[in-house]
Amino acid sequence: MLQFLQQLLSHTFLNPASPQTRAVSNLFWVGGAVATVILAIPTGVLLYTITHYRHKPDQQGEPHQTYGFKRLEIAWTVIPTIIVLVIFALSIHTQGLAEPNTDPGPTGRSDLTVIGHQWWWELRYPSGVVSANEIHIPVRTRWLVSLKSADVVHGFWVPQVGNQMYLIPGQTNHIWLEADKPGVYEGQCAEFCGAQHAWMLLRVIAQPQAVFDSWQRDQSRRAPVPTGRARSAPPPATGTGNTIARFQQPATGSTASLIASGAQLFQQLPCQSCHAIAGTKANAGIGPDLTHLAGRTTLAAGRLDNTPANLKEWLRDPQEYKEGSHMPNLLLTPNQLDALTAYLESLK
Ligand code: CUA
């Protein structure tokens, strides 16, 4: 039971991992403690009175009545007033800690821009890195994040490391994002935004500065040009299990040519009209940037773990996993699925 509760609360603000969320969490516990005491005292007095002063069989007439008790009336007016004022002051103080000024100033510069889409998160770093759904940040660094929307209103919320904020079309909002310790912090779109709102998950991955820097360097690289020769004929059909096992082998002979075939297919099929892969002709921004797709931990904004088998399933029929998603079922043949999966898996 305790373990279940712990798990339930582990990704909420009750397990804070930033100064801002810690302030909110502290206020919750102080407020909760005060409210518990306030509940306990009258309830206790009431229960005591009910049992202790109940009508006794040998009792005649009404018990002694008390009219007017000034000191008591002053006490029960003054004490609650003080409690309310203290909680009010604590709330103002918490607000100051939890929501420091987010005005980016005249430059309008922020450390990250997050753009909400139906149903995924576009991430743009000032370094030029573009990614999706998994926000990497250096640990113990306060980042000013700009929030925008490409379509409808979304809600940004990673409860352990930052406040909740709307992403509104035509407007830029800001929040602070900061994590005290390295870790993966789970978030979720917090505003109903259509059929797949529930599958609009995001992650904040907080890393030591050096690890973040190296991640950012890797992400700045363009996609490698496939070294193999694309097969003129489609690659032979193979069993699913076989294919996956083969993808885990180093890129030799047939895998290299499978990757090259996938790269070619990607440019021939409608894939490139929605997605971008840096270093290729594909540079559309309707769907997530795929330049480093294989380096991410999830697919389709958290709908699937990013494994070769899941990627292939997703390509086979996105609508089966995320109905209403803007990624259509392209009715790919098994050979096309193998080649595209191999290519996308090479985009680390
Ligand atoms: Cu985006 Cu709900």
Image (cartoon, rainbow, N blue to C red):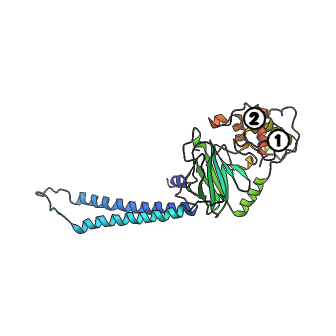
At label 2, which amino acid type do we have? Answer: Pro
- Looking at this view, name the residue that lies furthest to the left: 60
Q: Where does residue 329 sit, x and y in percent of width and height?
A: 69, 32
Q: Nearer the viewer, residue 206 or 104?
A: 104
User: Which residue is disc 1 drawn over?
Assistant: 259
* Disc 2 from disc 1: Cα separation: 18 Å
Q: Is residue 55 visible?
A: yes
| Residue at x 50%, y 62% (from the top left corner) | 95
At label 1, which amino acid type do we have? Answer: Ile
Q: Quadrant of residue 99?
A: bottom right
| Residue at x 31%, y 58% (from the top left corner) | 43
Q: Where does residue 248 sit, x and y in percent of width and height?
A: 79, 45
Note whether 139 is above or below 314 in the view shown: below
Side (left or right) of 66 relative to 340: left
SS assignment at label 2: helix
Q: Quadrant of residue 335?
A: top right
Note whether 242 is above or below 70 in the view shown: above
Side (left or right) of 132 relative to 153: right
User: Which residue is disc 2 drawn over?
Assistant: 270
| Residue at x 84%, y 32% (from the top left corner) | 234
Note whether 345 is above or below 85 in the view shown: above
Q: Residues within 10 Å of mark 2 (few under 14, many from 20)?
A: few
Q: Where does residue 340 sit, x and y in percent of width and height?
A: 78, 38
Dot 2 and dot 1 residues touching (CB under 8 Å): no
Q: Where does residue 267 sit, x and y in percent of width and height?
A: 80, 38
Side (left or right) of 176 relative to 257: left
